[in-house]
Image (cartoon, rainbow, N blue to C red):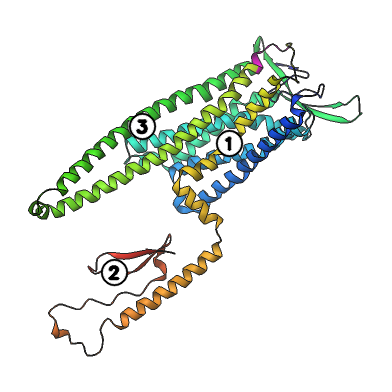
Amino acid sequence: MSTTLAPFEDFEEETSGPVDRSILNEPIVKSFFLATYILVFLSCVFGNFLILLIIISNRSMRTVTNFFLANLAIADLLVGIFCVFQNAAHFVLFEYGAWPFGRIMCHSYVYILHMIPNISAGILVLLSIERFIAVIRPMLVHHLMTKSVLIASTIIVWTASAIMNLPYLIAVQYIELNNPETGEKYGICTRRFLVMGEINVLQVVTTINLIVWYAIPLVILLVIYITVGIVLLRSTDRDSVTRSSQATTSTSSAAVRTKLLNKNSIDSSQNKANLEAVDSRKRVIKLVVVIVSCFALLSLPRYLYLTWSVWRDTNAPRCLNCLSALIQPTTFLLLFINSGINPILYAFLSQRFRKAITDTLSCASTKEKRKKHFLMKLRKTRCSDNSFANPIGLVAAESPRKLKPPLPLLDMTQINNGVINIGYGQNADSPIETKMP
């Protein structure tokens, strides 16, 4: 394999020395891109870190779906740490093409920038397959998606993407140059041509990435969600029939209702549970579909631009003062927005994530004080009830019924997710639960 330096040519960041004044240095354009980069950076870093913190610290959030979402958050967090600020400095803060972060960051930046979109595509496919099984065969999902299967599948995705993008890491070239006007040194992060015989390696790798990590996953996801949509539509139709039959039953005679009371109660509870399960699956599917759609739309410009950049004529002139010079940073920005938008989608589309985010951001010490205060009030209430459960002078023989045993004292261990067992109802069978204020 021979390597040839591509002087002053864009490599994916497509860097060149600061030759002409770029349109990105115009005040309006620079301010717009800089503000967008800041918002995306904050969402990528703090948003994805918050999602990881919620999933790790909250046991109820450690589901199969959230395991894949955590992997997605890790990938997006790497983009925020190693790519967003560096790309902003590369295009907006410094002269066009200058790289102020040194050799090591140049290599890690280029490698992660190519690797993460592929990882995101693979994780989304795994997540969609899990949702597909949960809808088609809900009883099998926990048997198929075991802990070992989850870990092995994600390791395969990360490893495959890391190996397939090694040519980009090999092709990275960091060069230090002198500015003839000021005499100061500056660096550029560019690439070498990797040629094996008559084959341009980067052309082959980039085309394979477009097909394997974008086109094929998109087809798989399309087939999955069309099938899931059909299944959920049929479930909705069956639920409509169930509701209709329940309404018809409710208008029947009182005698018939009396005879079928127990059976209808059981059927009603089962139907309600089924409806809640279907609604829950629909909400999760809606979230995943939105995430997949954002990935498909926001990643496509970068895949297409990168493919064009490795196949184009390297001797073709380029205009840094034209509007076409904005295409490249725009494709980067869209790719970064895809990494930063996921925490926002979780907050708006998932009630569980929204509640977990609120609980995490709220003051834990205040919540503990409120729990203890509420608990003490309930303990006093239960003690008061027990003191009047068998008052003095009451004779057991006055009633053939046995006196009910006194209500149990509230146990400290009966707090679970803000729900407290405060005793038993009149039928002495169902615990009365109350939510924390």
List x then y, in percent, for residue 138. 33, 40
Compare residues 104 and 78 and report the one nearer the observer.
78
Mark 2 residue element? strand
Compare residues 122 and 346 and report the one nearer the observer.
346
Label pair 2/3, CB-CB below 8 angstroms: no
Q: Of label 1 and label 3, which has the lower sequence position?
A: 3
Above or below 174: residue 434: below
Q: Tell me the quadrant of the picture where the N terminus can be found.
A: top right
* Residue 205 in sight from this viewpoint: no
Q: Which residue is mark 1?
A: 339
- Amino acid at pointer 2: Tyr
Residue lying at the far left of the rendered structure: 255
Q: Which segment did they paint magenta?
A: 309-314
Residue ID at (28%, 44%): 274
Compare residues 41 and 249 and report the one nearer the observer.
249
* Residue 115 in sight from this viewpoint: yes
Whole-angstrom CA distance, mark 1 to mark 2, is 49 Å
List x then y, in percent, for residue 129. 41, 33
Residue ID at (55%, 33%): 158
- Amino acid at pointer 1: Ser
Left or right of residue 365, residue 406 in this image: left
Numbered circle sitting on residue 424: 2
Mark 1 residue element? helix
Whole-angstrom CA distance, mark 1 to mark 3, is 26 Å
Numbered circle sitting on residue 18: none
Q: Of label 1 and label 2, which has the lower sequence position?
A: 1
Q: Tell me the quadrant of the picture where the C terminus can be found.
A: bottom left
Image quarter for residue 343? top right
